[in-house]
Structure formats: C-alpha cells, structure tokens
Amino acid sequence: MAAAQPSTSSSNTSEINVIQEMTDYYQSLVELFAKGVNFDLPGNGGPDCLEYLSETQRIYETILGLTVVVVAFGLGHKLHLDKPMRPKTWTPSTLRSILAVSMSFCIGMEFTYKLCTQQLLFIINPCHVMCFLQIVILNLNPYTDLAQDLFKLMICGLHFPLTACIFPVTNTLALPGEVFTFWLEHLLLLLIPIYLLLEKFLYVQNIFDFSYTLRFYAYYYIYNLLILQPICLVSMVNINNVLCPAIKDPFAGKYYRLHTLWHQLFFSVVIEKMFILLSKLSKLKSE
C-alpha cells in the first residue's frame, strides 16, 4: 500500500496542474475579451445581473425557446416558395462600394474601441453581426440566390438598429468618437437596406410570405440561446441582455425573456411588412 502513495500523489499533482493551466487560460481570455467591462454600470453584467434569474428558470426558458425555434424554423422552411435566380454578370456601383467601405470603417472602429477598452466580447452583439451581414450583401452579386436570400432575411432584423436608435444605450461609451460611431453605425444599418431597395437589384418577398420572418426568428434565437447565453454565463457579460434586462427595457421584470418570444416576432413582422410596403410605394412612384 505504501508503494502506491507516490503514484497517487503524482496523479493529484498532475490534476492540479491541469486545473491551474485551464484557470490561467480562462483568465487570459477574460483579460482579452472582458476585463474592461464595468459591472458597476447598470445592464453591463456582473454577479447581480447573473443572479437576476435563477438557474432553473433559465433552463426552462431555454427549453421553451428552443421548442419555439424548432416550430418556427419548420414552418418557415415549409412556407419558403422562392424560385431560383438566373445568374448574371454584375459590377458594383460607386455608391455601393462607398457604403461597403463606410460600414467596414464603422465595424473596424467598433472593433478598435472594444479592443482598447478590453471589452471585445461585445463585438458579437446582434447589431454588429448585422453590420457584417450587410457588408457581405453589399459585396455579393445580387443576381444570386444567396444574395437574395440574405437580403430578405436581413430586412426582418431591421428592428434591431431601429430599437437601438429609439432606446439608445450610450452610458457605457466613454472614448472620443465612440458615441458618434454608435449613431453612424445604426443609421447606416437603416439606410443601406433602403439604398439596396432603390437600386432594384435585390427584391423583397411577397407581403403575405412569412417564411423569412419565421426563419430569421429561428436563427436569432439559436444565436441567442446556444451561442450568446453560454458565453454570457461564463463571462458574466450581459451581451444582448441575455442575463438581465436593459436599463430602458419596457418589459423589465422576472419574465422579461419570455416577453422577447412574442415581441421580437411581432417587431420582426412589422418591420418586414413596412419595408415591403415601402418597396411597393417606390415602384408606384417610379411608374
């Protein structure tokens, strides 16, 4: 029995070393991505934000949310009836290139601000993801199924920048030009789809077609529940208000996340149909 003790001691030391290495690795990631996040600012995250909801409630809400996602995605896929596009040669206009460069500048500045303040984790906020999506659409040949599909999905999420403009959260922006970049980014997110619509290369869906809304809604909640939520729980950073409600959230309360299940779908439908009506009006005026 005595001979086995050194082996057991060595094994324990090895396990401790592995745990220490994992802890050091985690700390280095936190320092890079979230060390600068000020948890004293309301809505930014921290222990109080993490404990806003119980673990049991988060689990139940995640199961419910994923169930809704499966139903929405299934319905969206079943109702999707678009015909394939015929590919054509295409050269981007000067204005389209300027808009692509402007949006790239905005997201580049956001990346720089987040890196300087050690808050890089906020770069995966849905509005920033929407920036990347618009840059991709601006650089894609519009006469392809991918470009048409991404454009139709993108307009279902225009309530993100619109909500950010109506309820701006700028109390965490302290560096010179950071508030200006915030407004420029969100205004571009609203103006670029209008330009793409007036360009008449990309087409909106039928006003009675709900397939894109349902698919976008499903993608959004998959991103929220399966990607953002685990990151937020580990880092305690409140990205997209996954951990606790925003300071200006009109639905703040114990069930604020359940409210998102209906109001995100509602606003997505409303903004999509308003954009389609805008498309119809622009066609009537051009005729």
Image (cartoon, grey):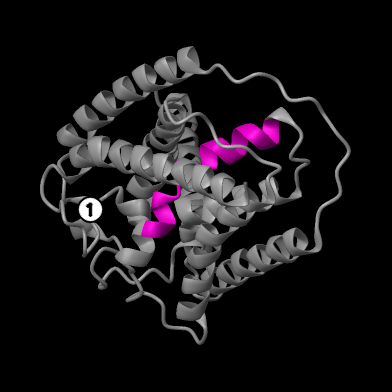
x and y, in percent, of residue 19 in the image: 45, 44
Left or right, 40 with reference to 66:
left
Left or right, 4 with reference to 238:
right
Task: Name which quarter of the figure residue 261 lies in.
Answer: top left
Residue lying at the far bottom of the rendered structure? 176
Task: Name which quarter of the figure residue 270 lies in.
Answer: top left
Task: Name which quarter of the figure residue 264 lies in.
Answer: top left
* Amino acid type indicated by mark 1: Cys
Who's the residue at 30% across and 53% down the image? Answer: 241
Given residues 132 and 85, the one toward you in this image is: 85
Say if 89 sits above or below 161 in the image. above
- Extent of the magenta region: 146-162
x and y, in percent, of residue 34 in the image: 44, 63
Residue pointed to by mark 1: 244
Q: Residues within 10 Å of mark 1 (few under 14, many from 20)?
A: many
- From the image, give the main secondary structure of the stretch colored magenta: helix
Given residues 256 and 141, the one toward you in this image is: 141
x and y, in percent, of residue 214 in the image: 41, 27
Q: How many marks?
A: 1
Mark 1, secondary structure of its residue: loop
x and y, in percent, of residue 53 in the image: 16, 45
Residue lying at the far left of the rendered structure? 254
